[in-house]
Image (cartoon, rainbow, N blue to C red):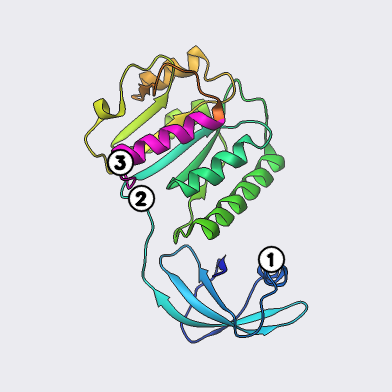
Amino acid sequence: MPRFFVDVPLICGERLALPDAIVRHVHVLRLREGDPITLFNGRGGEYEASLDVVARREAICNVVRHNDISRESPVWLGLAQAISSGDRMEFTLQKGVEMGVSAFQPLAAERSVVKLAGERADKRVVRWQEIVESACEQCGRTFVPEVRPILSVEQWLIQAPQADARLLMSPLGQKRLADVAVAPASVWLMAGPEGGYTSSEEGRAIESGWTPLKLGPRILRTETAALAAVAAIQSVWGDYAC
């Protein structure tokens, strides 16, 4: 069943005019009056609805029923990802959503190839949030992770939220996930850009209380490292049955 994110309050029994972006999807999918759809607004649960009007430039649905379901991970997982180039960042966001990441913090690292500031940075964050919302539509999540404004590594280390475990992907790491903590309720994971963090950045992170983590003997690319760590965290502490 087609599933759409709408950033508005949803009330059972109301008629809702769908946003233009969803109207375009309705036409691409060749949906018709009476077809069922699923809506969610990121505030919990999802709503059964049916299309009442499908016109050239509008689509109106009837919101029928709320289903109080959740597909969130039992461990809250934040990913502080250094900005990567090309499609790598978008890939990390999309797959991170599918794998249960709860929040994304883009970081401007010294070795980040892409440099973003001002209006250009704001537009990129908006684009990344759209990718996250689309990934939620696809994978069935009922809460939408936030993509936070870009910070430098130094800014992030000063104001990073507390968590039961704060893990830094690092070649210097010696600990395994099983050595770090027992079933933490919240985890922040910090992953580097192409070329990794500089020794200075890693040193400041370790001084700030981040635990250097190494998954194995092989060097992972930036788009692989964070997702491999997220999968491992879900396997050890989350909802992946192994």
Q: Which mark is residue 73?
A: 2
**Magenta segment boundaries in residue numbering:** 223-242
Q: Which mark is residue 131?
A: none
Q: CA distance from mark 2 to mark 3?
A: 15 Å
- Residue lying at 66% horizontally and 40% vertically, measured from the top left: 121
User: Amino acid type of disc 1?
Assistant: Ala
Q: Residue furthest left?
A: 182
Q: Where 102 sits versus 200, above or below? A: below
- Residue lying at 47% horizontally and 80% vertically, measured from the top left: 11
- Kindly indicate the quadrant of the structure image that contains residue 83: top right
Kind of element beneath mark 1: helix
Upstream in sequence: badge 2 or badge 3: 2
Q: Which residue is mark 3?
A: 242
Upstream in sequence: badge 2 or badge 1: 1
The reply, left or right, for residue 224 in relation to residue 118 is left
Q: Nearer the viewer, mark 3 or mark 1?
A: 3
